[in-house]
Image (cartoon, grey):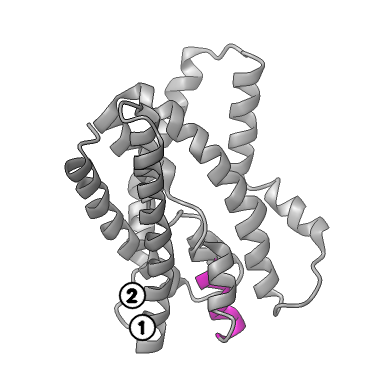
């Protein structure tokens, strides 16, 4: 999807190309996918969703963020990777992934108080994110910007629906993994596009509108898949 966006938006201004290309990558797994997948398939399904999100997180901070920095610098031929890597490894979501994987790999015990504290933070995060999405939603975009947004959505959902067909026909029918992955490939944009756009001085209204529209489309498509394909 990022490759398609990279070439399709090559005639756009650098700033607009940056936010549109970033919008073609990553998915909102944690805040949007986890609750729906757990509600539909149970906690055991989250194993597959988490594995999907590990790759998604690596793409978000290892590929999408440098792409954004590339366009923020004016699309120069070269990038100074030292400050980019320093910034990536200082981002809280990426650090959270590293810490969580380390705890899991080394089987480090955690007191119940730690889980309680994380649970409180997780519950508080969702309404704040919804507030942020509402702040950045814009109905004042011009026709060219709306047309550009529709192109990003076309890339995401045409590729997503193609992957649905591949997963549906090539994975075992009774596979929980198949059902979860079909949900995952239809997820909306990742929330990272908002802070990334702000940091790089891109038009955050485009990012917010793109994110909000994709949330609605993904919600409808996921339920269509559940009911139409009998995934439950």
Numbered mark located on residue 210 in the image: none
Q: Percent x, y for residue 83?
A: 78, 58
Q: Percent x, y for residue 90?
A: 69, 46
Among the 4 quarters of the image, the one containing residue 147: bottom left
Assign the magenta stretch its main secondary structure. helix
Q: Which residue is mark 2?
A: 138
User: Helix, strand or loop at disc 1?
Assistant: loop
Which region shows up in magenta? 12-21
Q: Nearer the viewer, residue 164 or 57?
A: 164
Circle 1 crowding by C-alpha within 10 Å: few under 14, some 14–19, many from 20: few
Residue at 68% from the left image edge and 61% from the top image edge: 66
Q: Which residue is mark 1?
A: 141
Q: Residue furthest left?
A: 227
Location of the C terminus (image quadrant): top left
User: Helix, strand or loop at disc 2?
Assistant: loop
Q: CB atoms at circles 2 and 1 under 8 Å apart?
A: yes
Q: Percent x, y for residue 185?
A: 41, 48
């Amino acid at each position: 999807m990022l490759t398609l966006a990279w070439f399709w938006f090559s005639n756009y201004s650098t700033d607009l190309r940056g936010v549109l290309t970033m919008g073609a990558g990553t998915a909102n797994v944690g805040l949007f996918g986890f609750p729906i997948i757990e509600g539909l398939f149970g906690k055991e399904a989250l194993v597959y969703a988490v594995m999907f999100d590990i790759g998604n997180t690596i793409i978000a901070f290892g590929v999408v963020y440098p792409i954004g920095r590339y366009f923020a610098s004016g699309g120069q031929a070269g990038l100074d990777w030292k400050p980019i890597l320093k910034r990536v490894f200082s981002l809280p979501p990426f650090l959270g992934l590293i810490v969580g994987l380390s705890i899991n790999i080394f089987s480090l015990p955690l007191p119940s108080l730690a889980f309680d504290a994380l649970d409180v933070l997780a519950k508080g995060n969702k309404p704040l994110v919804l507030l942020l999405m509402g702040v950045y939603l814009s109905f004042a975009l011009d026709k060219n910007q709306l047309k550009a947004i529709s192109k990003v959505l076309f890339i995401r959902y045409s590729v997503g629906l193609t992957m649905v067909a591949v997963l549906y026909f090539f994975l075992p029918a009774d596979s929980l993994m198949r059902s979860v992955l079909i949900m995952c490939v239809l997820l909306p944009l990742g929330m990272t596009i908002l802070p990334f756009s702000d940091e790089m001085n891109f038009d955050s209204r485009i990012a917010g509108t793109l994110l909000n529209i994709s949330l609605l489309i993904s919600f409808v498509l996921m339920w269509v898949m559940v009911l139409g394909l009998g995934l439950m």
